[in-house]
Image (spheres, grey):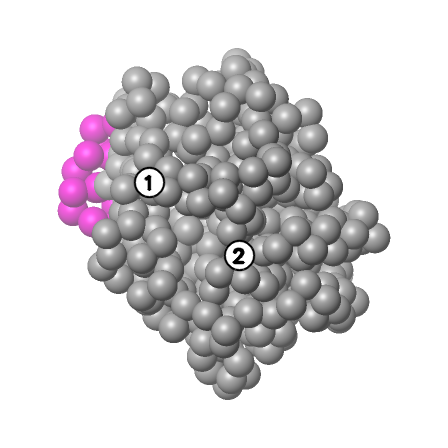
Amino acid sequence: MSNTIQAYRGSVLHFNDDPAFAGDSYHWHEDGLLVVDGERVLAAGDYDALAATLPADAKLHDLRGKLILPGFIDTHIHYPQSDMIASPAPGLLPWLETYTFPTERKFQDPEHAGDVARFFLDELARSGTTTAMVYCTVHPESVDAFFTESSARNLRMIAGKVMMDRNAPDFLCDTAESGARDSEALIRRWHKQGRQLYALTPRFAPTSTEAQLELTGDLARAYPDTYIQSHVAENTDEIAWVKTLYPQARSYLDVYDRYGLLRERAMYGHCIYLDDADRARMADTGAAAALCPTSNLFLGSGLFDFPAADAARMRLSLATDVGGGTSFSMLRTMNEIYKVARMGGTYLPALRMFYLATLGGARSLRLEDTIGSFAPGNEADFVVLDPQCTPLLARRTDRCESLEELLFALALLGDDRAVAATYSAGRLLASSSGTAAH
């Protein structure tokens, strides 16, 4: 019997390469079919070509008029900051002191952490995001709560305990030794348990001593298939601070490099003020950049340099950076990255924005054989977008004459209302009708 086979008819889009560097970078089936067998993609292509191959008992879902894409991948986001999103502050460092640290203090309470994790995962699902690289707090309880909730929903998630042993309130500091010990215990408990993956998470260089970064590097070598996540070169005041703390380092990025923290599966948020040597080093090591335009604009941090990053062939992905970012929506984040690029003199096509939010994220995470496209055998994480979801979008998309125009309208005018449904591992997570499966 083939009762696990579900087929979704609509306009199907996914990528095989970065449109900035490849002419044949995507698969577009205007009348398409996505075929799912249980938790995995069986096929994706033209409806006329695939419909006849369906078993008689396969269930066909008619989504004509809607767009079916791989689920969005958010490569830099802080789940504990859900409750302090849109908090006013004149810059990054006062924002941390005034709002972030007091909010994160509460996550030593497992019940509170679980409540926020549930809300956070619901918001991701409403926004079409099926995978995220997530910062927890310094408390191991915050990681256990997050992974307990994401595991129960069978989500492909990456997360880790923040490590910081200086320049933070005492109530949020670990030690170099306790941070490493707690992180290793969490790796053993959660890494590769179901669809959960662990990320070593030194918050950023100013809040870690050399001893802590050294022990983090030791863990990265001991567990080479784990992830690494941190912040780099976000803000000029922060960069000056790092220089006083690590005067021997050539650059902010070099601080991490000295401790073995640049490698594949290492994700660095922001990367605004890198120099050419930094960019070349990121490309050589396989480390990736998470572009966070919404938070960069909100905090006044600066504009990402696309031409320099592309010249170095850095791996790039897109991220909301909630709660510095002011929306969980990757569509709204595309809106902001387009404007950031324009302010820097670069035109960013919609095709590339959608690539960065799907396959670009998967490639940056070295998960391109698992998520990010509809290649046969990939996990069936996908989002259904409705171009008719608002009167303005409907009016604009009715006049679109190309795929690029359609995607551009969704990116510039869309938000969570455009998400008709979100599926993870073939299972409905959320829909615009309000139903959700947990």
Query: Residue placed at 72% from the left, 66% from the top?
Result: 177
Q: Nearer the viewer, residue 426 or 86?
A: 86
The answer to which quarter of the image holds residue 52 is top right
Q: Is residue 68 left or right of residue 263?
A: left
Q: Secondary structure at mark 2?
A: helix
Numbered circle sitting on residue 140: none
Q: Nearer the viewer, residue 407 or 90?
A: 90
Q: Secondary structure at mark 1?
A: loop
Using the image, determine if residue 242 lies above or below residue 404. Answer: below
Nearer the observer, disc 1 or disc 2?
A: 2
Residue at label 1? Answer: 301
Q: Position of residue 345 (x, y in %)?
A: 30, 18
Instruction: Give the quarter of the figure containing the N terminus.
Output: bottom right
Using the image, determine if residue 167 lies above or below residue 436. Answer: above
Q: Is residue 283 left or right of residue 108?
A: right
- Circle 2 residues within 10 Å: few <14, some 14–19, many ≥20: some
Query: Residue placed at 61% from the left, 70% from the top?
Result: 174
The answer to which quarter of the image holds residue 267 is top right
Please say whether residue 355 is visible from this viewpoint.
no
Amino acid residing under circle 2: Thr
Residue at label 2? Answer: 207
Q: Is residue 53 left or right of residue 421?
A: right
**Which stretch appears magenta?**
385-400
Q: Nearer the viewer, residue 115 or 14?
A: 115
Amino acid residing under circle 1: Ser
Q: Position of residue 378 (x, y in %)?
A: 68, 45
- Circle 1 residues within 10 Å: few <14, some 14–19, many ≥20: many
